[in-house]
Image (cartoon, rainbow, N blue to C red):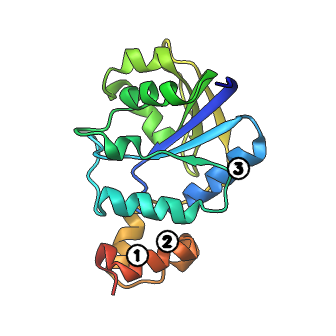
Amino acid sequence: MIKIKNCALFGGTFDPFHNGHLHLVKSLLAAKKFENLVVIPSGNPYQKSGSASASDRLAMTKLALKDQAVAISDCEIDRAGPSYAVDTIKEIKDSIHADKYTWVLGSDAFAGLASWNRFQELTELVDFLVVIRPGTGVISGIPGVRFEKIEIDALDISATELRNRIKQGEDVSPYLPVSVLSYIRENHLYGAA
């Protein structure tokens, strides 16, 4: 099996996968910092509750990224029980051999990293790339955690806000890939008519 230098892992609830997520993926690909980018919809996130089923979130992720040079892993969706990043990285390491693994996450998630399951073990397995989102302040380091920061012009919108807007019948087309919005409407997700 061929070994690569650096594999990036971008996990998330993706409930739904929106243009902010897509912009981040495109920015990471354009930077050519990683030989492989794996997008991982969470199965049963232990710190968040989802509105759409895991299979719907996986389908939306695949639709949004169909034209991007990324791998999409369903390892968390297929795994029983809560989704823990430390278990995911171990599973990814079994299938993708790299010199270095980098977990991509937002500054808000990075701020709560110490609360992640088996945090210490996780920090020994991966480095972190912290995406600085609009309106966030200075990101401070966590002792023993290897990380870099990246600033991108991300859309200042959250999946929670999008779900609420969809439920209220508002136009969310500027914030979602066309294929994802169609899927939401066809499957009546988030109260869509």
Regarding mark 3 in the picture, which secondary structure is present there? helix
Residue 157 pos. (x, y %): 50, 62
> Which residue is at the front of the view, 28 or 140?
28
Please determine whether, in this image, residue 80 is positioned above or below residue 152.
above
**Residue type of the residue flagged with mark 3:** Ser
Q: Which residue appears at 51% of the width and 25% of the height? A: 93
Give the residue number, with chain letter if any, for mark 2.
180
| First of labels 3, 1 by sequence position | 3
Please determine whether, in this image, residue 130 is positioned above or below residue 58.
above
Residue 193 pos. (x, y %): 33, 87
* Whole-number angstrom distance, CA of label 2 to CA of label 1: 6 Å
Please determine whether, in this image, residue 181 is positioned above or below residue 73.
below
Q: Which residue appears at 69% of the width and 44% of the height? A: 28
Give the residue number, with chain letter if any, for mark 1.
184
Q: Which residue appears at 43% of the width and 29% of the height? A: 91
Q: Which residue appears at 57% of the width and 18% of the height? A: 146
**Residue type of the residue flagged with mark 1:** Ile
Query: Mark number for residue 27?
Result: 3
**Residue type of the residue flagged with mark 2:** Val
Q: Residues within 10 Å of mark 3 (few under 14, many from 20)?
A: some
Regarding mark 2 in the picture, which secondary structure is present there? helix
Residue 114 pos. (x, y %): 37, 24
